[in-house]
Amino acid sequence: MNTESPSDERVRPLPVRVVALIATLGGLLFGFDTGVISGALPFLKHPTDAGGLGLTDAEEGLVTSALPAGAAIGALIVGGLADRLGRRTMLLWLAALFLVGALGTAFAPDLTVLVAMRFVLGLAVGGASATVPIYLAEMAPADRRGSIVAIDQVMIVTGQLLAYTSNAAIAELTHHAASWRLMLALASLPAVALWIGMRAMPDSPRWYVARGREPEARHVLLRLQTDDVEHQLDAVRATLRAERAAGSAKLAELRRPWVLKIVVMGFSLSLIQQITGVNAIMYYAPTILASTGLGTNAALTATIANGVVSVLASLLGLVLVGVLARKRLLLLGHCLIVASLAGIGVLSVVTQGTGATWLVLALMLVFLVGQQGSVSPVTWVMLSEIFPLRIRGLGVGFSVLGNWVTNTLISFSFPILLGTVGLGPVFAAFAVINVVAMVLAQRFLPETSTQTLEEIEEALREPVGVST
């Protein structure tokens, strides 16, 4: 249903931060559903007659990786659907999927249903990861785009903090193995809030123009109190004309060298964000801490520190992404990540995995400062910027596919590797991989700060070469 009335004489202001707050409830759900499993897993390992599902190490990896596996498919499919149906409509459908998945996991009678419902949640998470940044980038003015899009990252880690906090509280209050059901059910609340909130939001002006609905695009820009509305509309029209003149279908666009270059950039950005090992820490923090000798409930409580630092670091990143060049901020974050991964690896080998709980936790917190304050916000902001309008949804969805495929592989294999080779070698390997990623990112990624989306597209149309 169209919520805009271009013929209204009085234009109701719509602050872009209000738009961001509502849309990023999708990010909050992203964070909650990825973080909540860390607290549920220890209880799911209990026997079925005690309230758990008796999960083995492999089944633990299967339950955890079902969500990113679904997210990989969701990100790929939803990007194209968002181009056709609209960003707002897509977020309404995703809210419904979040609700079905949350209730389905909470009432799952066995492993099969639990994995299936985690996969459904993954479809929604992947769709949100592709749609929310696009929607925000297309609603925000150029000079505030970086900070507005980065709000999504803040909401993701806020969702993770809420998951960690609620997990610890439920574990302390219930003292029952079946408490995992209540942990998973809580995700239904923000799903309902997202659906209600998006009912009152318009679609993006850029999407309206692409669909030939310029009066609605103009009305939205007026509501957003955009400076020089006609200039903004002219810029979008010019971009669309250039794209339509090219004439080929969206998939055929990938055969163009400059478009293929952008797709490789997007895929690489997603890969870089995941090979830091962030989701090994976010999904398995209690398991990692328990491997150093900490009890289950104490590990759940200690994990709250991860959530707090993630939120604070993301707030810092919200500021930094608006004032620092993207590549400079990315380099700073990678330096912190490599140092902390190497530290955990060395410490775990030296102490043989026991007696170093608080040092390991401290290094995990340093890691999260680099990840959430730098690498993650830069990744999502740049993914929302680099693709041309005509294939923006499809391009982001395809690139984020790399994020979720890597996420799936890491989340499935991590508990198995942890039990096989131990914490030290796993984190040392992550450190080496991230040194390589850091060098490649600085060499090949473009700098996109201070440019409009149209200017970025024009610059990337230049002959294929190294961007400085």
Image (tube, rainbow, N blue to C red):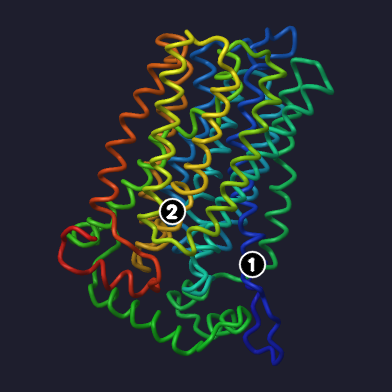
Query: What percent of the width, then of the height, locates residue 414?
Result: 45, 21
Query: How many discs mark residues in the rendered view?
Result: 2
Q: Could you tell me which quadrant the C terminus lies in?
A: bottom left
Dot 2: element: helix
Which residue is denoted by mark 1 in the rendering? Answer: 17
Query: Callout 2, which amino acid?
Result: Val
Left or right of residue 394, residue 58 in this image: right
Residues marked 1 and 2 touching at CB (< 8 Å): no
Residue for point 63% across, 81% down: 223
Number of other residues with Cα within 10 Å of mark 1, as a class: few under 14, some 14 to 19, many 20 or more: some
Compare residues 234 and 152 and report the one nearer the observer: 152
Tell me the mark number nearer the camera, choosing from 1 and 2.
2
Residue for point 45% across, 83% down: 232
Query: What percent of the width, then of the height, locates residue 169?
Result: 79, 28
Residue for point 50% across, 56% down: 131
Give the numbered dot on residue 302: none
Number of other residues with Cα within 10 Å of mark 2, as a class: few under 14, some 14 to 19, many 20 or more: many
Query: What percent of the width, then of the height, locates residue 66?
Result: 51, 29
Residue 30 vs 138, above or below: the answer is above
Which residue is denoted by mark 2 in the rendering? Answer: 378
Q: Could you tell me which quadrant the N terminus lies in?
A: bottom right
Query: Callout 1, which amino acid?
Result: Arg
Sequence-wise first label, 1 or 2:
1
Left or right of residue 26, residue 326 in this image: left
Compare residues 132 and 94 and report the one nearer the observer: 132
